[in-house]
């Protein structure tokens, strides 16, 4: 399946999504004048964010179907309490018409029935497209986008997401996730841009540029929200929202840079880490929320909590003996807005604390000003009803859908291809099997039409599953699921069908999930799938395994049994065709791993490890043994690298790198060229290597191209024992695809 892109529109998106940060305040209203006229209760209200359930007909988490706003509840929230923000969706995605009605009703009351006419800012988790809009465009999950090594594709996807989100009337997107995936067990790896800091920075900044453009008040743009500040992704246990132990050197080296880059790119808001770092819940850590975020990074946007996280200071973290004390701790630490989200206790308690002098008015005014300025930057004072005044003809358009397909096409990573199993010729009798083969929920992943993405009733059945796309691409295809995620299903029937095939496509992986529901105790692929593949292997047929996963699941036992392995990540309902096109050879795969794919559950060493991590029992340097390394990814053609040259500038402030890449095969292909640099000796134990530059290019069959890179000396820096970034003089080694050159700075 292929759709033709609206190239003109993509060009315009690329031009509009430029790199200038949006940091100019609008002049339509005088924010300070509004604040001076607000009561304490109204100010506290602006700092309160409620879940949509609170203002809807029905009980929280048990709303009336079809959804309906409750007029009395709505006025209690907006008129009586002066609530500044509402978020979320009532259980599942809504139509464009539903959203427009909801937003219009909310904004009408906020702008006409309150003392100051301050509009509501509505927020949503549009993680990989306008996922809470029925019919909205879903893109491959962020980890898949990272596998493209193509920030332009992420930028365009974000611009399209902003367009469809703003078409719904929603101006605030809780994205991107800038946590660096240093803990492979973590349930939210798929929401990140991988394990490498430089890659995460490039993809994250591109996404923010796509969301906000030059001017977030543009009716086709939204405010971004960088999350989750800080250290969220390195929990000691791998479980979500649990304790992280992070020395300051590591925090600054691996976890802070993505957020610093996002602040420089002009991100308008930040969401805070739900867990604790070194025993201090981040929601109560003034050192992180004020000293680091505000003073050092000079971030002037809105800091919003994650779900119920002030409550959790009392209930789970146990650092506050009462909820009132928890509110005091969080606000005085630097929180601007509380995602409460299901009652008014936060507002009531904060009002008490201000009246008692436990929270200074200056702290309240500071937060309210940030909130109102963000609303101003979004143009909400001038136009809170964006869809009323603007047309959005491109929602779910062919150009959007095709871009989703193209991302999947560049992301899909060919991990193994022995004996020419791929691409598959049309004369093959193909047997398709496995739990990922015939399910849209599996390929969409979580943050789909529902939070966990598991309710099939909201799937768009006009879209193809992987099986559907294979059926469209090949002439002789049979199917039997054979097993579910963790149980067998008609196993013997499946084996009998497989016996009549020439080749087996086994679609394996894990159930969509995120946050706490995604916690697992082992990275091993589920036992039922392992045993099922072992049974298929006994039939003597070549096996092509397609993996659909939230994170890398260990496949050590069955990897040798498969001729070919294709990592599809979670390609979305628009990406199933790309999977089939890779299998058929219509697409030459070009994705590369943005993570290290582990071979053992207790050997989770990342690519940029220390030299000591490589030591084996004989003190040799062979202990780093992943299934596949970061940056690995095969092609149907052969790329040859040559003539690596490295030179330094006269002032020692940069190095230039050039390399020739030749397509030696008969097929055109795309190649991501990754430039690694090793600091050979340093005052702190250096990493074996670090990614410092990359570029992706189309290289035609028989063609040689020269790629050139300039790496600034400060990009070779590390955090020393004084917690300062330094680039030390000495010897460095540049490596690209097995070629190496040394240089001394």
Image (tube, rainbow, N blue to C red):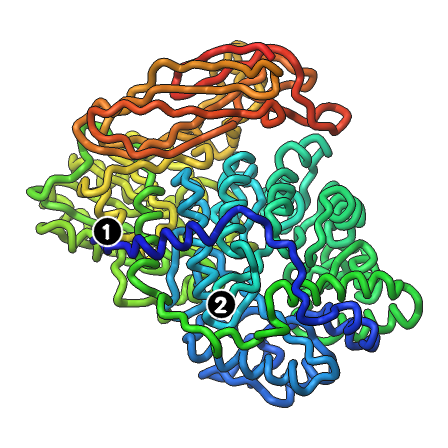
Relative side of 188 to 476, left or right: right
Image quarter for residue 738? top left
Q: CA distance from mark 2 to mark 1?
A: 47 Å
Q: Nearer the viewer, residue 491 or 672?
A: 672
Q: Residue at x 57, y 64 (%)?
A: 217
Q: Residue at x 82, y 65 (%)?
A: 364
* Residue 485 visible within the image: no
**SS at circle 2:** helix
Query: Which percent across, then down, holds residue 440?
Result: 32, 60
Which residue does the numbered mark 1 point to in the structure image? 491
Spot the residue most to the left: 427
Which residue does the numbered mark 2 point to in the structure image? 166
**Nearest to N terminus: mark 2 or mark 1:** 2
Image quarter for residue 469? bottom left
**SS at circle 1:** helix
Q: Nearer the viewer, residue 668 or 446?
A: 668
Q: Nearer the viewer, residue 585 or 697?
A: 697
Spot the residue most to the right: 357
């Amino acid at each position: 399946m292929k759709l033709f892109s609206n190239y003109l529109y993509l060009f315009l998106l690329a031009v509009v999504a430029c790199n200038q940060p949006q940091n100019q305040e609008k002049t339509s209203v005088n924010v300070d004048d509004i604040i001076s006229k607000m009561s304490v209760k109204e100010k506290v209200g602006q700092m309160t964010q409620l879940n949509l359930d609170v203002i809807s007909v029905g009980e929280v988490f048990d709303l009336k179907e079809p959804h309906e706003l409750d007029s009395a509840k709505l006025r209690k929230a907006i008129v009586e309490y002066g609530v500044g923000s509402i978020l979320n969706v009532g259980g599942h995605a809504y139509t464009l018409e539903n959203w427009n009605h909801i937003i219009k009703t909310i904004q009408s009351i906020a702008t006409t029935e309150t003392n100051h006419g301050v509009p509501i800012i509505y927020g949503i988790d549009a993680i990989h497209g306008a996922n809470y809009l029925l019919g909205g465009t879903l893109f491959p999950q962020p980890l898949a986008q990272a596998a493209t090594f193509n920030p332009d594709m992420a930028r365009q996807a974000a611009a399209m997401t902003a367009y469809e989100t703003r078409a719904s009337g929603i101006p605030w997107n809780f994205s991107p996730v800038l946590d660096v995936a240093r803990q492979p067990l973590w349930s939210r790896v798929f929401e990140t841009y991988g394990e490498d800091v430089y890659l995460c920075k490039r993809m994250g900044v591109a996404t923010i540029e796509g969301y906000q453009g030059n001017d977030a008040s543009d009716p086709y743009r939204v405010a971004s929200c960088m999350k989750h500040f800080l250290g969220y992704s390195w929990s000691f246990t791998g479980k979500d929202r649990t304790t992280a132990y992070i020395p300051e050197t590591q925090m600054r080296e691996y976890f802070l840079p993505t957020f610093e880059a996002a602040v420089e790119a002009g991100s308008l808001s930040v969401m805070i880490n739900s867990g604790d770092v070194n025993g201090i819940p981040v929601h109560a850590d003034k050192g992180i929320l004020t000293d680091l975020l505000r003073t050092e990074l000079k971030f002037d946007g809105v800091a919003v909590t994650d779900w119920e996280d002030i409550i959790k200071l009392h209930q789970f973290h146990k650092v506050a003996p009462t909820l009132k004390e928890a509110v005091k701790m969080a606000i005085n630490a630097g929180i601007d807005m509380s995602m409460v989200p299901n009652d008014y206790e936060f507002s009531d308690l904060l009002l008490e604390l201000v009246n008692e002098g436990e929270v200074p008015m200056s702290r309240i005014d500071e937060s309210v000003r940030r909130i109102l300025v963000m609303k101003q930057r979004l143009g909400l004072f001038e136009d809170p009803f964006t869809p009323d005044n603007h047309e959005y003809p491109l929602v779910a358009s062919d150009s959007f859908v095709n871009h989703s397909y193209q991302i999947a096409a560049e992301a899909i990573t060919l991990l193994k291809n022995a004996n020419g199993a791929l691409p598959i010729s049309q004369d093959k009798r193909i047997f398709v099997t496995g739990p990922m083969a015939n399910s849209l929920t599996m390929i969409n992943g979580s943050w789909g039409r529902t939070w966990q993405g598991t309710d099939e009733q909201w799937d768009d059945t006009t879209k193809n599953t992987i099986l559907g796309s294979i059926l469209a691409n090949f002439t002789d295809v049979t199917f039997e699921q054979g097993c579910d995620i963790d149980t067998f299903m008609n196993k013997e029937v499946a084996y009998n069908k497989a016996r009549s095939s020439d080749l087996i496509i086994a679609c394996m992986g894990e159930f969509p999930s995120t946050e706490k529901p995604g916690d697992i105790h082992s990275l091993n692929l589920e036992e039922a799938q392992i045993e099922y593949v072992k049974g298929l292997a006994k039939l003597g047929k070549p096996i092509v395994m397609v993996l659909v996963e939230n994170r890398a699941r260990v496949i050590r036992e069955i990897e040798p049994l498969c001729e070919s392995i294709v990592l599809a990540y979670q390609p979305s309902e628009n990406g199933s065709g790309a999977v089939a096109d890779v299998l058929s050879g219509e697409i030459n795969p070009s994705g590369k791993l943005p993570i290290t794919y582990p071979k053992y559950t207790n050997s989770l060493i990342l690519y940029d490890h220390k030299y000591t991590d490589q030591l084996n029992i004989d003190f040799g340097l062979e202990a780093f043994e992943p299934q596949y390394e970061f940056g690995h990814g095969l092609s149907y053609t052969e790329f040859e690298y040559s003539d690596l040259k490295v030179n330094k500038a006269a002032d020692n402030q940069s190095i230039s790198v050039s390399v020739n890449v030749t397509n030696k095969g008969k097929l055109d292909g795309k190649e991501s060229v990754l430039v690694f640099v090793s600091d050979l000796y340093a005052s702190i134990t250096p990493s074996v290597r670090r990614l410092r530059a990359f570029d992706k290019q189309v290289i035609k069959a028989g063609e040689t191209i020269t790629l050139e890179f300039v790496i600034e000396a400060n990009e070779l820096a590390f955090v020393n024992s004084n917690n300062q970034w330094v680039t030390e003089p000495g010897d460095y080694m540049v490596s690209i695809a097995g070629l190496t050159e040394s240089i001394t700075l």
